[in-house]
Image: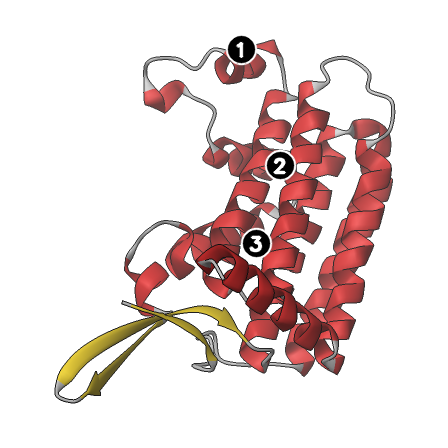
Amino acid sequence: MSELHRYINISNASYQRHLAHPQMQELFKLAELYSDKMSEFVRLPTRGNPVPQLLFQSSMTTFMSAFQLAFSGHTSAVHATVRAALEAALYGYVISRGEDHFGRWKNPPQDSKKKVRASEAFRFLKEEGIDEHVQLKANYEALIALGAHPNKPSISLHTRLTTRDDVDESEFIAIYGPSKQSAVYIANAIGTAALTMVVAGATLTDCRARLFEEGRTLYKRLLDYLESNAAPPRPASNGTPTRS
């Protein structure tokens, strides 16, 4: 059996174990709620520039990919995927604000400081009086701190050091079983997706009120879940290692 086939079999088995877990079932319903609600809006007829809506379609499907990884226990890959989904939403919002912003996205300037950036979205949301800009920025930065970049936490949070026959070995934990800690990571991914529904409301203005309500309601449900199922932020050590 190839290593890829082995990984797919293990991740599929982990996915089934996650779905059989009562806490995970509750989270899965919330992930479904985001996916079903968001799909309604991104499929609506487009007026004007279609690219912002297309970026929200990309964001939605990338979030669903993150959910699949998360419910399969592949925690180390979740943060980078969630960050990509969040950035797609933020970019869609920025370029919806005018031809100048769209032009900078379509033909990126040589000066990197003039390219479309996520930080612009946080600033514009603040200027619009959309309070979620604070939590969105915090989530964006937390994803990097948890390993969305190939930084130290992307390795240290998922590596177990052992000594066997006087030889030091390192094991990278690829797939985790269901636990309270993994549930927190999954909830954070769904919560970030919920916040991007508010960003979509600021972008797809015909649906502004409905998207604001849907996103804020879902996010509140995630906060309630986290309050009832609090756990430390570090993943549990039970998992499927890849020895190096």
- Residue corresponding to mark 3: 135
User: Closer to the camera, 16 or 58?
Assistant: 16
Q: Which mark is residue 103?
A: 1
- CA distance for labels 3 and 1: 28 Å
Disc 2 residue type (three-letter): Ala
Residue 119 screen position, x and y as percent = 46, 36
Q: Secondary structure at mark 1?
A: helix
- CA distance for labels 1 and 2: 17 Å
Badge 1, how many Cα within 10 Å: few under 14, some, many 20+?
some
Quarter of the image that includes the C terminus = bottom left
Q: Which residue appears at 79% of the width and 28% of the height?
A: 205
- CA distance for labels 3 and 2: 15 Å
The tally of labels here is 3
Residue 97 screen position, x and y as percent = 63, 20
Q: Which residue appears at 51% of the width and 62% of the height?
A: 7
| Side of 28 relative to 89 (left or right) | right
User: Closer to the camera, 13 or 207?
Assistant: 13
Q: Secondary structure at mark 3?
A: helix
Q: Which mark is residue 89?
A: 2
Q: Which image quarter: residue 26?
A: bottom right
Q: Which residue appears at 74% of the width and 78% of the height?
A: 20
